[in-house]
Image: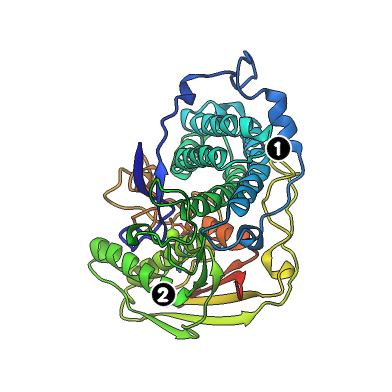
């Protein structure tokens, strides 16, 4: 079955940044249990020690340069096969490491149906990749089939965040918030990389396909329906203008505010609105949307909706900075995989001479963050939001119900408490950062630094 699927588009109702054709594949993995949590009854596709072996294999952090190295689509046959094999060299170890981490959770957590669903998804995805790992992909036909497998992988894991969030909320009596945050932070950071690797090859794959059944002619123009903007290399926009994304996100968040509060604050952009760099638009959109939701909500709830949110954009050539610290696992209640990509040490900034960082300051007059709230803002699930429409017994479980099925993106103004920590995970993935400076009684400044690639040929 062929269907046009819009994916990785977190801003609902916005022009889609990536349009492509995915072949949707039904799979029946969840009904074919080959081994259980305790590792019993190993009958099938991925043996337990194979997972352990794969998870232990060395991994290095992903860079934007890795994703750009196969060139601009449409790719030649050799470049397409190289991209497929590169993808194949990265994914199995990463999936295996997630399976290991899920297995290491306390039993009461892994028995939760939502958490175990995610575990099954990972196990299924690994089992679909392993047949390809035994040998290299050497023909376009194999690459085509591999494309189907990747499309299935991306589709299978689309709703991981709301499902895991629900699972952990249901288990919150048994696990401390600090432990949940540690697990989710590592897991969701690793997931960013896994999805990016799969989506990048898929995007190159589709952008390199002939439109019809005619013999491949790489220089043939594609139909307008399938056209990929020329500044895209896979899922990376090589000329992304943060100011433009800010305006798109402002529209989206403004609409939510009008629905919820009946007002929409103003937003002014200063600094260098024309600044551009190469980055992953869906990541930038996610972060900006979450930061604007926080700023708009605070501004309105403090009664200051007449005060504009001031956004200042500053572009600076990158200065190689200190690597972010890798936090120790010593004090947590369950084991994390030391090989996880929690803080990629080989971020773009230090390794690529043409890298560029853009810092965006979002300044609101929303009264700031109360000192007693401040220590919790980076915890997954921490929120000061409660909606009278929500059933208070369920607390922020209800916020989950507002997540759209397409991108796992929240359409409510707040409530899940994932906005700041997940935004920071996205920003740090390629060596950026988010810093929050609250002026209690007045407002909040958020400094978002994103590191991208300066010039891409
Ligand atoms: P959520 O928005 O779902 O509550 P976040 O992680 O985005 O989750 O934010 C956590 C908390 O941090 C918010 O509930 C709010 O109390 C506080 N916060 C974040 N940004 C701001 C801001 N700009 N002004 C005031 N408080 C903020
Ligand atoms: Mg928020």
Counting from the top left corner in percent of width and height, residue 348 is at: 67, 66
Disc 1 within 8 angstroms of ligand 1 (CB): no
Q: Is residue 218 visible?
A: yes
Of the two numbered discs 2 and 1 on the same chain, state the one appearing first in sequence: 2
CB contact under 8 Å: marks 2 and 1? no
Callout 1: helix, strand or loop?
loop
Counting from the top left corner in percent of width and height, residue 404 is at: 34, 48
Front residue of 235/220: it is: 220
Counting from the top left corner in percent of width and height, residue 179 is at: 62, 43
Residue closest to the far bottom? 271
Q: Mark 1 highlights which residue?
A: 335
Q: Nearer the viewer, mark 2 or mark 1?
A: 2
In the shown orientation, is residue 103 left or right of residue 6? right
C-alpha span from label 2 to label 1: 42 Å
Q: Mark 2 highlights which residue?
A: 244
Q: Residues within 10 Å of mark 1 (few under 14, many from 20)?
A: some
Callout 2: helix, strand or loop?
helix
Q: Quadrant of the C terminus?
A: bottom right
Q: Residue at x 68, y 56 (%)?
A: 343
Q: How is the image coloured?
A: rainbow
Q: How many marks?
A: 2
Disc on res. 187: none
Residue 118's place in the image compared with 7, above or below, is: above
Residue 383's place in the image compared with 443, above or below, is: above
Q: Residues within 10 Å of mark 2 (few under 14, many from 20)?
A: few
Q: Quadrant of ligand 2?
A: bottom left
In the shown orientation, is residue 156 left or right of residue 68? left
Q: Is residue 105 visible?
A: no
């Amino acid at each position: 079955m062929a269907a046009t699927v819009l994916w990785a588009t977190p801003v609902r109702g916005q022009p889609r940044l990536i349009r492509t054709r995915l072949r949707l594949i039904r799979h029946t993995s969840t009904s074919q249990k080959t081994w259980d949590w305790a590792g019993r009854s190993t009958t099938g596709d991925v043996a337990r020690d194979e997972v352990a072996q794969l998870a232990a294999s060395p991994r290095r952090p992903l860079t934007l340069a890795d994703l750009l190295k196969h060139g601009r689509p449409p790719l030649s046959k050799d470049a397409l096969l190289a991209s497929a094999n590169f993808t194949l060299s990265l994914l199995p170890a990463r999936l295996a490491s997630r399976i290991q981490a899920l297995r290491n959770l306390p039993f009461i957590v892994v028995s939760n149906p939502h958490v175990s669903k995610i575990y099954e998804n990972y196990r299924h995805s690994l089992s679909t990749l392993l047949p390809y790992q035994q040998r290299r992909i050497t023909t376009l036909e194999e690459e085509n089939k591999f494309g189907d497998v990747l499309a299935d992988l991306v589709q299978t894991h689309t709703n991981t965040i709301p499902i895991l969030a629900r699972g952990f909320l249901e288990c919150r009596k048994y696990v401390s918030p600090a432990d949940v945050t540690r697990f989710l932070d590592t897991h969701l950071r690793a997931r960013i990389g896994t999805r990016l690797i799969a989506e990048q090859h898929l995007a190159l794959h589709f952008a390199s396909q002939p439109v019809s059944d005619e013999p491949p002619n790489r220089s043939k123009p594609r139909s307008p329906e399938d056209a990929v903007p020329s500044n895209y290399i896979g899922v990376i926009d090589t000329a992304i203008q943060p100011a433009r994304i800010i305006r798109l996100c402002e529209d989206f968040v403004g609409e939510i505010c009008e629905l919820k509060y009946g007002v929409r604050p103003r937003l002014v952009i200063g600094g260098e609105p024309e600044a551009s760099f190469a980055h992953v638009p869906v990541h930038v959109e996610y972060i900006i949307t979450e930061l604007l939701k926080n700023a708009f909500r605070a501004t309105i709830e403090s009664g200051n909706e007449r005060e504009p949110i001031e956004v200042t954009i500053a572009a600076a050539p990158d200065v190689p900075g200190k690597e972010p610290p890798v936090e120790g696992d010593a004090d947590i209640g369950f084991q994390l995989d030391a090989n996880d990509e929690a803080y990629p040490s080989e971020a773009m900034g230090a390794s690529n001479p043409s890298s560029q960082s853009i810092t965006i300051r979002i300044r609101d007059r929303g009264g700031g963050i109360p000192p007693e709230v401040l220590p919790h803002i980076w915890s997954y699930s921490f929120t000061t939001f409660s909606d009278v429409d929500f059933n208070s017994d369920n607390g922020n479980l209800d916020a989950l119900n507002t997540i759209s099925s397409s991108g796992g993106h929240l359409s409510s103004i707040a409530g899940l408490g994932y906005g700041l920590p997940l935004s920071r995970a996205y920003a740090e993935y390629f060596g950026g950062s988010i810093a929050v400076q609250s002026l209690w009684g007045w407002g909040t400044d958020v400094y978002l630094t994103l590191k991208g690639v300066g010039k891409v040929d």
